Amino acid sequence: MDSDAIIGTVVLAGFIVLIAAVIRTRRKRRRAIEAWATGHGWSYRRSEDLILRQRRSPTVNRGVSEHVLHGTVSGSEVFSLENYQQSSGTATTQQIVGLDLGFPVPTTMILRATPEDRSCREYTRVTTQNSAFNQRWRVLAEKSADVGRIEHLLSSRFADLMVQEQELIGRAEFTLEGHYLLTILPGAQQVDRIAPTLDLLEGLAQALRHSLHTD
């Protein structure tokens, strides 16, 4: 066997070993997520694209959904999934956690405020009376007619919590849609992030409910 053939054989063998290792890692990860779901009384699905396809917000209605978990916390339906998106040659993996509020909300995106971001121009900017919140977050309403309602929902209690919990929130972003409050976390599905994220969402949900019942 000449040197080129030997090199080709070695490269092929290495490629096969690499693929096998990737498959084993993915299988191990899937089993770990399934075990977490079983241990916490949640359901697990390997994929479920419809859960996001029915959404309207561009931050959550695209890509492929994997490792989808459904559960109930404090009487509210919740879910957590891994979302993979690819656009213009750029791939993004994010974890999306959702909490059923139990009441309808106008479609709203709460994104980190970045001066250079000019996306979602068709959405209407919403401001609150909390200047610190306005500096950190860019609130966008799908419909301009909903601006007043959104301003009422994002009460001082909600805005204060969003400012105070910066360490927990990190790089997360949020969406209100249908009757759900969703948060988008960078990176793959990590089950150890679910509990603290749901604690945050429940706190925000309580603030929204308080606003809902306040004239």
Image (cartoon, rainbow, N blue to C red):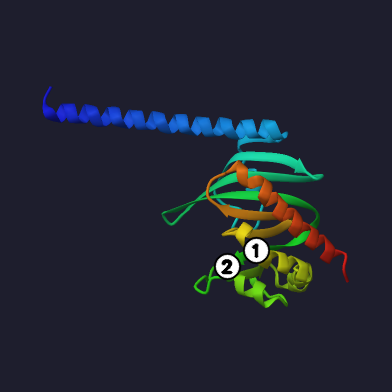
Most foreground residue, 38 or 69: 38
Q: Circle 1 is placed at which residue position?
A: 109
Label pair 1/2, CB-CB below 8 angstroms: yes
Q: In x, y percent, where is residue 16?
A: 34, 28
Q: Is residue 121 above or below residue 190?
A: below
Residue 86 screen position, x and y as percent: 47, 51
Please tell me how crowded label 2 is: few (under 14), some (14-19), or many (20+) other residues with Cα within 10 Å. some
Question: Residue at label 2?
Answer: 120
Q: Earlier in the sequence, mark 1 or mark 2?
A: 1
Number of labels in the image equals 2
Q: Secondary structure at mark 2?
A: loop
Q: Residue at x 73, y 40 (%)?
A: 71
Q: Residues within 10 Å of mark 1 (few under 14, many from 20)?
A: many
Res 201 label: none
- For the point 65% across and 46% down, the residue is 194
Look at the image and tell me whether residue 177 can be seen: yes
Residue 177, image x, y percentages: 71, 57
The image shows residue 132, relative to residue 76, as above or below, that is below
Image-quadrant location for residue 49: top right
The amino acid type, in three-letter code, at marker 2 is: Cys
> What is the x, y in percent for residue 9?
22, 27
Q: Is 93 positioned to the left or the right of 43 in the image?
A: left
Q: Say which of marks 1 and 2 sits in front.
A: 1
Can residue 54 be seen? no
